[in-house]
Image (spheres, rainbow, N blue to C red):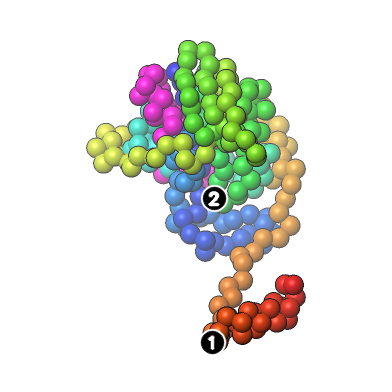
Amino acid sequence: MDILVCIKQVPGTSKVEVDPVTGVLKREGIDSKMNPYDLYALETALRIKEEKGGTVKVISMGPPQAADVIKEAYMMGADEGVLLSDRKFAGADVLATSYTIAQGIKKMGHIDLILCGKQTTDGDTAQVGPEMAEYLQIPHIANALSIEKVEEKSMVVKMDMPNTVEVAEIKYPCLLTVEKDIFQPRLPSYKKKLETKDREVKVFGYKDFEDKDENKYGLNGSATQVERIFPPEVNNDKEMWKGNGIELADRLSKKLKELKFI
């Protein structure tokens, strides 16, 4: 089975700057890490490979330094990795990002199963996985809690719905976004780090894609743009009150009314 895991490099800190012109995060020069939710998708892929055989590939989109998360995936057991990196991809919203990654997947060739984390910690939209599946015209399931059975032409998945837990069979090729409780991710292996230190990370850019319509990538292909983004204000104000339960309850009620919370 050919499995592909979508991974992303995200800021490793909440102290990031925002470009005042484009409204996007400045990712250069800040500590970064693999999106935590993607670790669960990668672990799921590795376990399926261990049980059924096949290959595990990873794909990421970002600046050149995003290759670091692909190398981390190698240390966990991934076989191949592709980085989509081009200035024309910069500033993409979820729509343009989904389209770009879908084009990269088409460039990679046949894939049976695509796995994504539920969401990313920098965007939190949880939209890219399903949108990619729509562009690729393949079936998809979001919020997968567990994989009940892996068969030759399909798999049975338990998924978390708003009010129920449902079980569905889905045929390959398909895409799943997985919940964080599906498996406990393994740690990178130092042995695999030595074994894969010279392994290639393939890089695809705009010129490598079949569709060269510039209006579908980056800011040009984004249906939405961030009007304003800013870090939350830090408020360390506090008051210490003393008294019995009745006195404190009365004072708290008056304070909430003063703040117009009630």
Q: Are marks 1 and 2 in contact (CB under 8 Å)?
A: no
Residue type beneath disc 1? Lys
Residue type beneath disc 2? Thr
Q: Which residue is mark 2?
A: 121
Residue 106 picture location, percent across and down = 58, 23
Above or below, comparing residue 90 to residue 76 in the picture: below
Q: Which residue is mark 1?
A: 242
Residue at position x 59%, y 56% in the image:
25
> How packed is label 2: few (under 14 Cα within 10 Å), some, or many (20 or more)?
some
Q: Counting residues from the N terminus, which is met first, the one under dot 1 or under dot 2? A: 2
Instruction: Look at the image and tell me whether residue 113 can be seen.
Output: yes
Residue at position x 74%, y 47% in the image:
224
Q: Give the extent of the magenta segment.
A: 43-68
SS for dot 1: loop
- In this rendering, position of residue 71 left or right of residue 59: left
The Cα atoms of the two marked residues, 1 and 2, are separated by 40 Å
